[in-house]
Image (cartoon, helix red, strand yellow):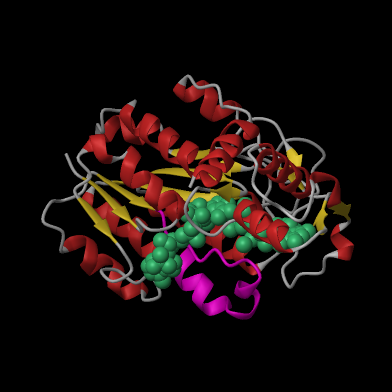
Amino acid sequence: MSVVLIGGNGQVGYELRRALAPFGLSAVLDRSRLDLNDPDAVRPAIEALDERPKVIVNATAYTAVDKAEDDQASADRVNHLSVATLAETARDLGACLVHYSTDYVFDGSKDGLYGEDDPTGPLGVYGQTKLAGEQAIVRSGAAHLIFRTSWVYARRGKNFAATMLRLAADREELSVVADQVGAPTSAELIADVTAIALGSTSLDPDRLRTISGIYHLVAAGETSWHGFARHVIERASANGRPLKASPDRIKPIATADYPTPAKRPANSRLNIGKIERTFGLQMPRWTTHVDRTVDQWCEA
Ligand SMILES: NC(=O)C1=CN([C@@H]2O[C@H](COP(=O)(O)OP(=O)(O)OC[C@H]3O[C@@H](n4cnc5c(N)ncnc54)[C@H](OP(=O)(O)O)[C@@H]3O)[C@@H](O)[C@H]2O)C=CC1
Ligand SMILES: Cc1cn([C@H]2C[C@H](O)[C@@H](COP(=O)(O)OP(=O)(O)O[C@H]3O[C@@H](C)C(=O)[C@@H](O)[C@H]3O)O2)c(=O)[nH]c1=O
Ligand SMILES: [Mg+2]
């Protein structure tokens, strides 16, 4: 049995090292062993592994949404071209590729929840390159699980919740957009559900092929970035964390009043019916793991 993880140091990758351990995770390839800026390096790195992998989990991505607008070539190599090569390599080895994608493949104009088959229409380079990565996987013919998630945070790593806490310690007032809605999703939930999905197949190649497809993997419920920020500050304050900004000083603003290089979707709400039905799950509300994470930060 051989499961290989590419990228063990990002938010999701770090949690996958924990959640995939019971599958006998046989190798973790970090950037020093495989740099996805070079698509030609992908196949040799996988073929050089001691054990032929049954499952390849890719937790890497170029995730700097604004920076990607001026760095399209690099984002495309990491999020698309290297992913395409990885998928072809997985197909040739008979391995299943597990991959993560994003709500930013949608334009956010839909009124309601996005299903897996809804038309895409990324607004920026990050979303465009992530979509191209998804499409290359599907086209490759490899068995695959593509989990689209959103607004990821973790105890460890760079994320919006950690930024809000840091800013609230320094400033009396924060302004946060209230007209973009979605579901904050913890890296631990993403890693746990990945393990459940893989475990449901006993890593049998035929069963991995049967469940192949795109799945929306986000926490239940929804909020805005403003609601997310306010909840984090409320929880941290309740935990006695000294902050200059009180929850009431987290000001809701419009997207137009927070100009950024990359446009973001106004509606990031993803329908989780398919993943819940397929794997017998009931996703926790978004606040469940936010509270847990903030509590961990406050204990540290
Ligand atoms: N963060 C979010 O809000 C969201 C993320 N996603 C998706 O979830 C997945 C995981 O994201 P997340 O864990 O948050 O990302 P992080 O930004 O926390 O981690 C990214 C990982 O990718 C690695 N990486 C980046 N560039 C390269 C490269 N050229 N070669 C090798 N490794 C590289 C980083 O390595 P290093 O540590 O060396 O820098 C790091 O391990 C991605 O597919 C992302 O698109 C989807 C929705 C929301
Ligand atoms: C820091 C800050 C951000 N914002 C806004 C900007 C933006 O619209 C929103 C979120 O900001 P961020 O830049 O942290 O988020 P962003 O990097 O766009 O987050 C995205 O990352 C990629 C990787 C994904 O796949 C998405 O699901 C999503 O999580 O909040 C404020 O309104 N006030 C602030 O003080
Ligand atoms: Mg960001």
Query: Whole-percent x and y of residue 147?
Result: 50, 43
Kindly give the residue lying farthest to the left in the view shown.
50
Instruction: State the residue in front, 287 or 278.
Output: 287
Task: Out of 295 and 10, give the one closest to the viewer.
Answer: 295
Picture layout, residue 187 above or below residue 67: above
Image quadrant, ligand 2? bottom right
**Quarter where residue 70 is shown:** bottom right
**Residue 22 in view, yes or no:** yes
Query: Residue 105 versus residue 119: which sits nearer the camera?
Result: 105
Taking the spot 15% from the left edge, 51% from the top edge, the residue there is: 52
Q: Point out residue 273 in the picture as x, y percentages from the top left corner.
A: 60, 26
Residue occupying image coordinates x 43% and y 57%: 10
Please state if 43 lies on the left or on the right of 215 as rendered: left
Which corner quadrant holds the N terminus? top left
| In the depicted structure, whether residue 35 falls above or below residue 30 | below
Quadrant position of residue 239: top right
Task: Decide which of 173, 109 is in the foreground and name it.
Answer: 173
Left/right of residue 189 with respect to residue 250 in the rendered view:
left
Residue 106 in magenta?
no
70 magenta-colored: yes
Q: Magenta residues, as a range?
A: 59-79
Residue 115 x, y percent position in the rendering:
65, 36
